[in-house]
Image (cartoon, grey):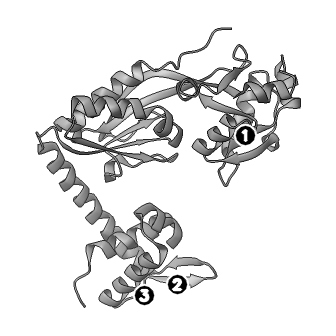
Amino acid sequence: MDAADWNHIKALLAVLEAGSLSAAARQLGLAQPTLGRQIAALERSLGVTLFERAGRSLLPTEAARQLGAHAREMGQAAARLMLAATAQSEAIEGQVRVAASDAVAAHVLPPVLRHLRQVAAGITVDVVASNSISDLTRREADIAIRHVQPTEPELIGRRMPDDHAGLFATGAYLDSIGRPRTGAELAKRAEFIGFLDFGGEANRLLAAELTARGVPMTPTQFARSTEGAVAWEWVRRGLGVGVMQLAVAAATPEVEPVLPEVVQIPIPVWLVTHREVRTSRRIRLVFDVLAEALAQLPGGPTRA
């Protein structure tokens, strides 16, 4: 049996956790055939079968499940090593990875990144734009902007002022539907742009929130659904009414609030990092700059 390549072990762990080659390839930033070759190479080096195909799915064998437990331990040890090394860094230069939703990454972070360039030219900020919660303990990011309080004991979070979400559309679109004056009129006349998730939970929750605030809706009334940043671009292009954080809407002059006195949905904001990397000067600097920027965002509740 040959010594296993660490990249191949990471590939095994990713497939076990993601449940499919395609999802694991996206997580690792690899092409699916490349990931498949890594799994095949690991099977050859270990002399065992790790996955069996059932239609279009991959089913892990007992060998894969047993090896997966050891691979997780190796991954955790590697993450601890990297965290310890990062914490020892005293130079205010190098890379810092910040995770945020795609809409926040596209519309809120650019001025923050410009400011960081001015105060710390040696720091390179890579933004992980994703609507899933990045795993800071596995170094998918150094800092994350989250909307839920962190529960992992190794993470620390700073509660920022709440943002709020509201309904927005272009003036031209509102004119085209007669500028509804009540939530019931809006629900009847407008075309709503929702968020794509394959279980439909996002639009069910959104419909419930809007109904509770006087816009009686069902999930099926979201005529178009897509990812957050794309959905917002559709709103900006006049395709319908969408829900967005006020901080993002404030950076988009083409839209205007719709029934702001009716719809104001509070959104908690947490700035999160790992306890160990918080001792790194460059990560601490980026954390503090982000905290200052988030505290000044125009996300408070609007007034009628």
Among numbered discs 2 and 1, the one appearing first in the sequence: 2
In the rendered structure, the answer to whether residue 211 lies left or right of residue 206 reads right
Among numbered discs 1 and 3, the one appearing first in the sequence: 3
Quarter of the image with the C terminus in it: top right
Residue 9 in sight in this render: yes
Q: Secondary structure at mark 1?
A: strand
Which residue lies at the image location 69% right of the left edge and 34% below the top edge?
Answer: 242
Q: Name the residue tied to disc 1.
A: 193
In the rendered structure, the answer to whether residue 256 lies left or right of residue 45 reads right
Q: Name the residue tied to disc 2.
A: 52
In three-dimensional space, the C-alpha distance between marks 3 and 2, rounded to whole angstroms, equals: 8 Å
Q: Name the residue tied to disc 3.
A: 49
Q: Position of residue 29 (x, y in %)?
A: 42, 63
Which residue lies at the image location 50% right of the left edge and 48% below the top edge?
Answer: 132
Residue nearer the viewer, 21 or 105: 105
Q: Is residue 232 above or below residue 176?
A: below
